[in-house]
Amino acid sequence: MSLRGPLGQILLVLAIVTLLGAGFLHFYEKQSIDDWNPPSARVLFEPYLAAERLLTELEMPFSQIGSLQDAVDLPAHSALIVPAGRVGLTDQARASIRQFVRDGGHLLIESERWEDPDPLLEDLGVTRSEAPDVDYDDHEWLGFSSLFIYQDPTESVDVDDPALLLVKWHAQTDPLVVTSLGGDLLDADDAIRRIDGDDGTRILQRRLGEGLITAINDISFAQNWRIGRNDNAELFWQILNDTPDLAHVAWFRTKPPQLWPWLRSNAFAVLISVALLIALFIWHGLPRFGPLQADPGNQRRRLSDHLSASGRFLWSAGQRANLSRATAACAYDAVARRYPHLRSMGVADQIEFLAKRFALPPSHASALVNGSQIDDAAELIRLTRSCRHLHRALAGTQADSTDEDRKDQP
C-alpha cells in the first residue's frame, strides 16, 4: 500500500490527529478558578440576608416585623432580633417589647451608639457607658468600604486583630473568635452572663419575667459581610439557641423615616420660612397693572389716532430707528408715485432732485433715498418735518413756504 494513494492519505491524517489529541490530553491540566462577583443591590439593602439564608438551611422558621408593637403577636418560644437604628419608638412599642420578654420571648437587642439616646435599652434594665477609643485604621472593619477591599466574605481574619473577641459562650474547650467593633459598653446589675473585651462588657444577658434579654453593643457579626468569617455564624446560632425550645426567629426591620414627617417634626419653622420666601418671590415677579379704570365708551377711533398711538408706543420703546426708516420710506414712495422717473435715476441724481425740487437738506434727501437709521431724537424730529413739508408740496399745499416751516429746516 502506498501513502500516495487515497487510503494512505486518510490513514496519515488520522495518525496526525491521534498524535495531536494524545499530546493535548497529556499536557492539558484542568484547574478551577474563583471568579469574584460583586454583591447585588439586595445584599446591600438587606444586611441580614445571609443570616436568613442560614436559618433556612437549618430549617428554622423566621419572619420580619415592621413595628415593635407587633412583638406581642409573635409565636411562643420566639427570638426577636432588634438592630440599632430605632427611631421614634412610641410608649406602646416599648411596652410591647417588655411584654414579649415577660411572656417568655428572647430579645436580641443591639445598643444604639453612645451619642444617641436609647430609651428602649434603658427600659430593659441595661445601661451604657462610653468606651475608650480603639484604632481600627489598619484593619478591614471600616464599614462599607470593606465591601470593595476583600473579595472573599468567608476569609478568616487574624485573631490578633483588635476588632475580634474571644468568646466562651458555653462550656466549649476552644473559645469562639467573633467580630466585635467595640462601641459603647454595657452593664446590668442582675446580668447572668457577660462577655468582656479589653475595654469592658460588650455582650450581656439578663432575665426579665419568663424571658431572656441578650444585649450586644455590636451585632454586625451577623451581617452579610461578616457572618461567614471566623466563628461569627456559630456565635449567632448559639445565642439564638439560648431561647427555650426555640421555634421561631423574627427580625425587626427598621424603616428610614419619611422625608415629609421628618421635616414637619424637625424643621417646621424652616418650611414656613421657605414658603414665605417663595410667595414673596412670586409676588415680586408679578406685573403691576395699577388701579382698575373704567372701560372706554363705544366710540370709533380714527386711523390717525391709531397711528399716533403706535408712534408714541414706538417712541417710548426706543424704536426711533424704525420710525425714521418708515417715515423716509413713506415720503420716498410718495415722490416716486408723482415722479416715476425718480427710481431710474442714479443715487446722486435722486438726492440732487429731491434737494432742489422740495428744498430739502442734502442729509434728509440722502436719508429718503438710502434709507434712514436715525436714533437721535432731535434729528428724527427734523427729518419728520422735512417729510411733512414734502407731503404738503406733493398735495399742492404751499404751507411749507411760510416762515414757521422755514425755521424748522436746519
Image (cartoon, rainbow, N blue to C red):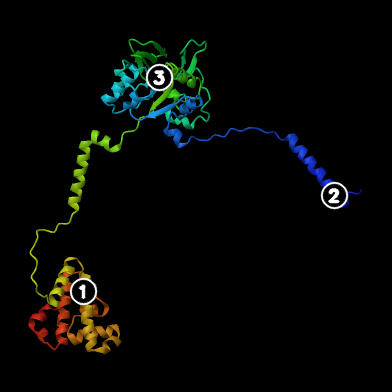
Q: Is the residue marked by circle 3 packed among few (<14), some (14-19), or many (20+) residues within 10 Å?
A: some
Is the Cβ of the residue at disc 3 closer than 8 Å to that at disc 1? no
Q: Which mark is residue 77?
A: 3
Badge 1 is on which residue?
A: 324
Crowdedness near tag 1: few (<14), some (14–19) or many (≥20) residues, C-alpha within 10 Å: many
Position of residue 286 relative to residue 54, above or below, is below
- Residue 305 in picture, x, y percent from top left: 12, 74
Q: CA distance from mark 3 to mark 2?
A: 81 Å
**Residue at point 48%, 21% (across, down):** 232
Q: Nearer the viewer, residue 378 or 35?
A: 35
Q: Give the amino acid type for the residue marked by disc 3 in the picture.
A: His
Name the kind of residue labelled 2 in the image: Gln
Residue 316: image x %, image y %? 16, 66
Q: Which residue has dot 2 on it?
A: 9
| Mark 2 Cα shell of 10 Å, populated few (<14), some (14-19), many (≥20) | few
Q: Is residue 42 left or right of residue 353?
A: right
